[in-house]
Amino acid sequence: MNVGRIGIAYSFIDSNQNSFDKLGKNAAGSQELLYDKAINLKTDGLFSTGRPTGESLTVYKSEDYSDTNPVYLIKGTDKDGRAFEQKINVNEVNPGNCSYVEMITLNVHLGKTDTSNVLISGLDLSRQGHGDYFSRQNFMPSLCYVRECQKSANNLIGYTKYDQLVKSLIEHCNRNNLHLNLLDTYQI
């Protein structure tokens, strides 16, 4: 099943408004990002997400999947409307140098796909200004930053969720012999 055209006007503040191609004004005069793109969310996968730019992805277990070889198949649509498929072995995903698609797949593998998903909000913060699902970056500083914001706001539940997430990502790297440069990471 596909879900399409979920709202076509999104209002929010963005510090890098030049990175968006459709910027308009609403009746109150504030800036709005206007999109007229279909978002293809699938119900047959483990997880599906999309953005108003038309980007979408769904994560499936691949035929090659096993506990020792956790390979997932990701199908989606890129920002230019082209369909893509990608196989990802999450044992090779380093949150200090990976794409949004890889990070979402690692999120699914770690079982962090509930409705209060802290990783998604941290990843969306990281992606601001990065343009697409495939740009490689270090997601850890943003996740640690949001964790510290939760602590500063005395939101101990939020802080605990982000702290558990950061620790699980570090454990993932240690378990799979992936080098995570902690010096670049905000207060681990």
Image (tube, rainbow, N blue to C red):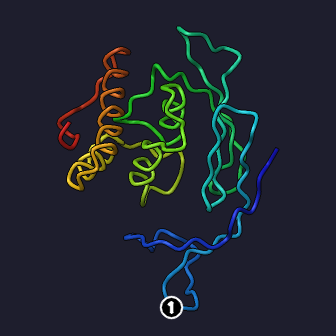
Q: Residues within 10 Å of mark 1 (few under 14, many from 20)?
A: few
Identify the residue shown where x is 38% and y is 34%.
95
* Amino acid beneath label 1: Gly
Secondary structure found at label 1 = loop
Identify the residue shown where x is 34% and y is 35%.
96
Q: Is residue 164 shown above or below 3? A: above
Which residue in the protein does label 1 denote?
29
Q: Residue 178: image x %, image y %?
A: 34, 21
Identify the residue shown where x is 54% and y is 47%.
133
Q: Check the picture and name the quadrant holding the N terminus.
A: top right
Q: Check the picture and name the quadrant holding the C terminus.
A: top left
Residue at the right extreme, as displayed:
1
Q: Residue 54: image x %, image y %?
A: 66, 58
Q: Residue 172: image x %, image y %?
A: 37, 21
Q: Is residue 31 shown above or below 88? A: below
Q: Is residue 45 left or right of residue 186?
A: right
Q: Is residue 151 left or right of residue 123?
A: left
Q: Is residue 120 left or right of residue 177?
A: right
Q: Is residue 1 left or right of residue 88?
A: right
